[in-house]
Amino acid sequence: MRMTRISGKARPLTMNAPIAHTSSPHDFPAEGGAARGGDTIEHRIQRSYWMADRGPRPLTRGWGHFFAAILSLIASTVLITFAWMTLPWWQGLAVTVYGVGVVGLFGVSALYHRWPWVSMRAVQWWRRADHATISVFIAATYTPLCAIVLDPTQALWMLSAAWVGAIMGVVLNLVWINHPRWLDVVVYLVLGWLILPLLPNLWESAGPAVVWLLFAGGVVYSLGALVYGFKWPGRNARWYGYHEHFHTATIAAAVVHMVAIWMVVAG
């Protein structure tokens, strides 16, 4: 039986155990925290997050978002070009915001999860960016819907609430990256369902198909957020764990919502 060393302790490497992708956090300095070998609370927290981010994890981690980033770049480029050719400039700008948001979400996630970052500081900052882009993406998804479908007053209130919430989510992740996992779930769910009171307006203006697509995508996003929050199923999976379920949910929901936005732009 072959042995692997994780966090300074040897343990057997079996076919059911996930593979470590990088070195142990003991190989790196604390970078702004305790000196190497220190045992402060902050340093232990940093080591625990290092192992969560760069320790043993499913082998497919991040690949879904890598391919989603490439495909979303192509789809968003076509959508943005079509919008600028057919819609007023402010609506074309709103579609551009959405395109940047969806590509940014998957692109940052792919870089964070797949790139072999070699310092705790780099991992922490990319973790901040990864979490912060989720809030921005939710607000960016609202932007073309509000700009094209809703009347100016409704659009102003909806976009103000969505972007204020997104900014708060960004600040939360930049300032307090080690916040409880459930807080992320609450922020994502509240932001994601802000538009619920305006669904009747969307039903009348954009049509039932768009509303059903938005609702279905919202349900899938919500289920993904709950999977992320509860770390279930597949917490210790070798190939495909709870985080991969979460990523798959975001991809599926993003596809459904992009179809809805295409219908709004082309309608």
Image: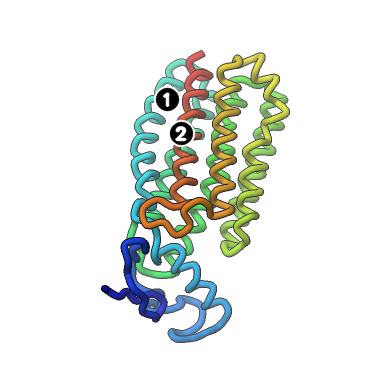
**Residue positioned 69% across, 19% down in the render:** 201
- Using the image, determine if residue 231 lies above or below residue 198: below
Q: Position of residue 130 (x, y in %)?
A: 48, 52
Label ID, residue 79: 1
Q: What crowding class fits label 2: few (fewer than 14 Cα within 10 Å), some (14-19), or many (20 or more)?
A: many
Residue 152, picture quadrant: top right
Report which residue position mark 2 lands on.
99
Q: CA distance from mark 2 to mark 1?
A: 8 Å
- Where is residue 143 drawn, in percent x and y? 58, 31
Q: How is the image coloured?
A: rainbow
Dot 2 amino acid type: Gly
The reply, left or right, for residue 116 in relation to residue 188 is: left
Q: Is disc 1 placed on a helix, strand or loop?
A: helix
Left or right: 108 in relation to 149: left
Q: Are marks 2 and 1 in contact (CB under 8 Å)?
A: yes
Reply above or below: 128 against 219: below
Q: Position of residue 105 (x, y in %)?
A: 46, 44
Q: Name the one closer to the observer, 67 or 216.
A: 216
Q: Pick whichever, 245 or 64, lies toward us.
A: 245
Residue type at mark 1: give it.
Answer: Leu
Residue located 66% across and 14% down the image: 204
Image quadrant of residue 74?
A: top left
Circle 2: element type? helix
